[in-house]
Image: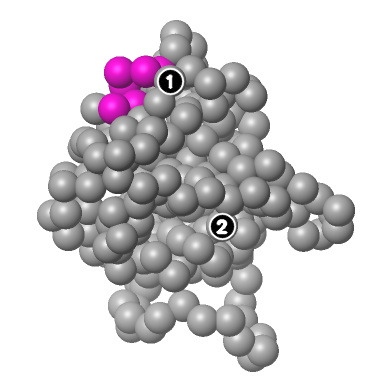
Amino acid sequence: MSTITTHHQPFAETDEPVFSLSVERYHQMIEAGILTADDPVELLEGILVFKIPKDEPHNVAAGLLDDELRAVLPEGWCSRNQGSLTLPDGEPEPDAAIVKGDRRKYLRENRKPGAADTAVVIEISNATLQRDRTIKLRSYARAGIPTYWIVNLPQRVVEVYSQLQSDDPTDPHYAHSKVYHAGQNVPLLIDGQQVGVIRVDQIPP
């Protein structure tokens, strides 16, 4: 039985002091049963935030995206769906991530993929669009993940963020962003090489 109280509050930046969790402490809470699979939370920038329930358009889009990714991924890479990534300051659960190795690799190694294992991370956004463009964008850039996609369901486009820059070591960011519309193809890049394209028309349901 979880001891987390489920008061749903929108995530917001605040000047008030908050209790920040390290990834190690977060893992300890899971191992101790303080946090369980019944607790709809994820650790972002050291703060536990509520995951917004996924509706059916989101679920369908996730399946369509997975079909497209599987068709073009080269050997040695796999698509990870709604699985956690262990980052220095959090453990987000993106809707999709392109990670090194086969599906059993991280089970054998008794760990979750990290930024060094990840070529592309993808969020499918409807109600989560504001969070995905802010806190998650910062988290993925800070961790050093090369490319971040947002599948923007309301506008039926794919936003792609790339070209990491760290002029200020404390504030890495994506220097380039591009929006792909219906009728266009999004290039899928792994290690700087294009391995295929994903058709924007094939993702939104």
In the displayed structure, 50 sits above or below 37; it is below
Q: In the image as oriented, which residue stretches furthest toward the front?
A: 183
Nearer-the-camera pick, 112 or 149? 149
Q: Which mark is residue 153?
A: none
**Which residue sits at x=59%, y=19%?**
193
Range shown magenta: 68-73
Number of numbered markers? 2
Count neighbours of disc 2 (C-alpha within 10 A) and say few if under 14, some if 14 to 19, many if 20 or more. Answer: some
Mark 1 Cα-neighbour bin, 10 Å: few <14, some 14–19, many ≥20: some
The residue at 81%/59% (across/down) is 170
Residue 196 is tagged as: 1
> Residue 112: x and y, percent?
50, 35
User: Residue 59, how many percent across, how many down?
Assistant: 19, 48
Q: Main secondary structure of the magenta part?
A: helix
Q: Residue at x 48, y 18 (%)?
A: 195
Could you tell which of marks 2 and 1 lies nearer the N-terminus?
2
Q: Which mark is residue 137?
A: 2
User: For this rendering, which residue is in front, 30 or 104?
Assistant: 104
Query: Camera-side residue: 39 or 191?
Result: 191
Name the amino acid, label 1: Gly
Distance, label 2 to label 1, CA atoms, is 24 Å
Task: Find numbered disc 1 in the image and state the secondary structure of the residue it sits on.
Answer: strand
Residue extending furthest toward the top? 75
The local secondary structure at tag 2 comes to helix
Work out whether 109 lies above or below 156: above
In the shown orientation, is residue 14 left or right of residue 73? right
